[in-house]
Structures are given as structure tokens and as C-alpha cells.
Image (spheres, rainbow, N blue to C red):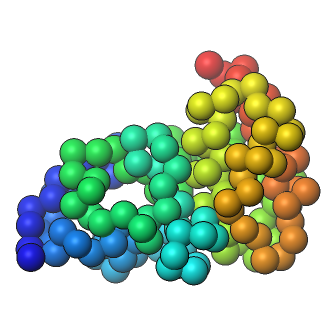
Amino acid sequence: MVEKISFKLNSKPVSLEVDGDRKLLWVLRTDLGLTGTKFGCGEGICGSCTVLVNNEATPSCQISIKDVAGADVITIEGLEKDGALHPLQKAFIEHDALQCGFCTPGMILKAHSLLTENPAASREEIMKGMEENLCRCGAHPRILDAIETAAKEMKGSR
């Protein structure tokens, strides 16, 4: 059933008339053209489609658009501010933590949620927090290094 769904997307108000049962992933990619959010497994297991919903990492393939009504949704496209990359985005580039890049948006947003919740996360806590996001290329060590680097920068900018 078509419903009017309003929410904040990347700091801007959005109002759509869509089938409320459609998955957020497909609304972002198809209706709104935000293709940074990737389709991976479609079952919420790989983390490729991770977005932030009220600052919590959420697999967008598992949440209906009606479930984000009134929420604050952030995609990889909304993480930079005023043209400046977020410390996580910069660290992923610096550490070459994006071999093929397919998992990168989900990894960065999951790391953002993790560091928001625990800014002083140890490497072990980062490993545990990131274990639901998969990288087929095997860049996990560089991803962990990037998250540790970003955590230091983010802590200094608070």
C-alpha cells in the first residue's frame, strides 16, 4: 500500500509516497539514486547495505521504508560535511582499506556506529564490533588499522 513516509536523509528532510513495505535499500538506490549503499546478500548477513538509522548501524535490506518514518537516516553519501571527508573515510583511503570498495560504505558506517557508542574501542572490541561486516577481498587487517586511526582523530575532534 502506498504511504507518505517522511524522514531525514543525510541531514535533509525527505517525503516520499511509496509502498511502505519496500526495503529501505531499494528506496535509497532506486527511488533516491543513492547507490553508495550496496546490495550484498539480501539477508542482513554481509553488512554491505549498512546505513545509520538514528546513529545505529542497520542493514537496509532488512528494514522497511515505513520503519524509518520520522527517523534520521545517514548513508555513505551523507557522512562527509561541507565537502570534507569524515575521518573514517580519510583513514580508509590512507590505509588502503578498500581493495574492491564494495563493502566499504557498510564498513565505514558500521565503524561510525561502533565508535559513536564506544569512542575508545580497543582493537579487540573493533574486531568484535565489525565481525558482521564481511570483506571478500580480505582487507580486514587494513580495515581495522583504518578504524583505529579514525578513532584517534575522532576522539581528538570531540
Q: Farthest right residue?
A: 141
Across and down, in percent, residue 67 comes to 27, 56
Q: Is residue 71 above or below residue 42?
A: above
| Screen quadrant of the C terminus | top right
Residue at image position (78%, 77%) is 136
Number of callouts: 0
Q: Is residue 100 above or below residue 148?
A: below
In which quarter of the view is residue 26 placed? bottom left
Q: Nearer the viewer, residue 52 or 9?
A: 52
Q: Nearer the viewer, residue 157 or 116?
A: 116
In which quarter of the view is residue 103 placed? bottom right
| Screen quadrant of the N terminus | bottom left
In which quarter of the view is residue 135 placed? bottom right
Residue at image position (87%, 47%) is 145
Q: Is residue 20 above or below residue 68?
A: below
Residue 94 visible to the viewer: no
Left or right for 115, reference 62: right
Left or right for 68, reference 119: left
Across and down, in percent, residue 144 comes to 84, 49
Residue at image position (83%, 33%) is 122
Residue 26 visible to the viewer: yes
